[in-house]
Image (cartoon, rainbow, N blue to C red):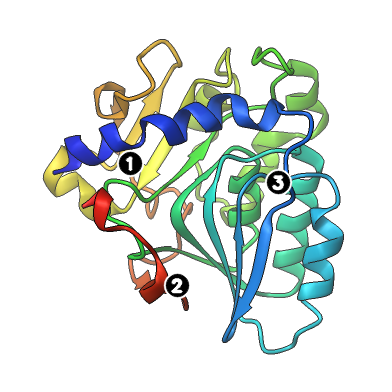
């Protein structure tokens, strides 16, 4: 089951590897459903202002991040820090990669959802990259990415492990965190991919013993529900 779900990530991970280099990516889709702000798609410059306006709605308690390959790095930090200042929860619905992971870490409480199958739902981290996909070491240091992650995981993330993922040489590399329960079926719930494996073989990447909960990536193993879950077309992923 998990193996099939990992393979179904193929096109999504391709987008994550190169999508945030597209020069004219559309802004994130943003909608408010109940007390949730649901954000999906590529993070682009200008999204911070749109999210700021959305958060003027005092009823919002949770930001749901759905199927985002990441995008503009400064915007990711800005929105993540904005979410933290508002004291909001965040939840991953589907996949949330690269710059999106900084939005996710902005949550004061952080969760996975059960909107999609467990083998599809994950949050992925790596460093900063140039348009050709190669590591932008200067930006990793300028943004103090390691320290930022340690701070936004409430001091729980292992700096040595963080170094392994923020210095991955290409944007194809990424550490993937799945719900801790995935370990019972796949042998691990965290996989570090160096970018050399085929992109549809996440399950063949290096397993990491520590889970998203161990490292403060999520704060609870409870699964949340996207407020629009009933409208999602996910049957083909099961």
- At label 3, counting other C-alpha atoms closer than 10 Å, the crowd grade (few under 14, some 14-19, many 20 or more) is many
Q: Nearer the viewer, mark 1 or mark 2?
A: 2
Q: CA distance from mark 3 to mark 1?
A: 28 Å
**Where residue 135 sits: x, y (%)?**
67, 15
**Where residue 19 sits: x, y (%)?**
62, 30
- Residue linked to disc 3: 43
Q: Nearer the viewer, mark 3 or mark 1?
A: 3
| Front one among 175 and 146 | 175
| Front one among 36 and 86 | 36
Classify the position of the N terminus by image quarter: top left
Q: CA distance from mark 3 to mark 2?
A: 20 Å
| Residue 226 circle label | 2
Q: Earlier in the sequence, mark 3 or mark 1?
A: 3
Which residue: 52% across, 56% down?
Answer: 66
- At label 2, counting other C-alpha atoms closer than 10 Å, the crowd grade (few under 14, some 14-19, many 20 or more) is many
Vertical position of residue 85 compared to residue 195: above or below: below
Vertical position of residue 50 compared to residue 205: above or below: below
- Residue linked to disc 1: 210
Question: Which structural element holds mark 2?
Answer: loop
Contact (Cβ within 8 Å) of mark 1 with mark 2: no
**Where residue 6 sits: x, y (%)?**
27, 36
In this rendering, position of residue 232 left or right of residue 32: left
Q: Earlier in the sequence, mark 1 or mark 2?
A: 1
Q: CA distance from mark 1 to mark 2?
A: 26 Å
| Residue 94 circle label | none
Vertical position of residue 108 compared to residue 128: above or below: below
């Amino acid at each position: 089951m998990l193996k099939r779900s990992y393979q179904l990530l193929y096109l999504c991970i391709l987008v994550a590897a190169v999508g945030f280099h597209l020069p004219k990516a559309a802004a994130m889709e943003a909608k408010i459903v109940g007390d949730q702000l649901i954000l999906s798609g590529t993070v682009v410059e200008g999204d911070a202002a749109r999210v700021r306006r959305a958060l003027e709605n005092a009823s919002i308690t949770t930001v749901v991040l759905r199927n985002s390959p990441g995008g503009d790095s400064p915007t990711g930090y800005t929105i993540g820090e904005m979410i933290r200042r508002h004291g909001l929860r965040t939840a991953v619905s589907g996949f949330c990669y690269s710059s999106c992971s900084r939005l996710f870490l902005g949550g004061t409480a952080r969760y996975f959802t059960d909107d999609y199958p467990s083998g599809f739902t994950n949050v992925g981290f790596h460093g900063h990259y140039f348009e050709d996909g190669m590591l932008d070491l200067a930006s990793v240091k300028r943004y103090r990415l390691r320290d930022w992650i340690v701070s936004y995981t409430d001091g729980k993330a292992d700096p040595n492990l963080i170094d392994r993922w923020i210095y991955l040489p290409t944007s194809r590399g990424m550490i993937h965190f799945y719900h801790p329960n995935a370990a019972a079926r796949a042998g691990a719930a965290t996989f570090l991919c160096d970018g050399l494996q085929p992109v549809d073989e996440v399950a063949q990447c290096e397993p990491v013993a520590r889970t998203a909960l161990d490292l403060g990536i999520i704060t609870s193993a409870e699964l949340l529900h996207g407020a629009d879950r009933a409208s999602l077309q996910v049957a083909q992923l099961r």
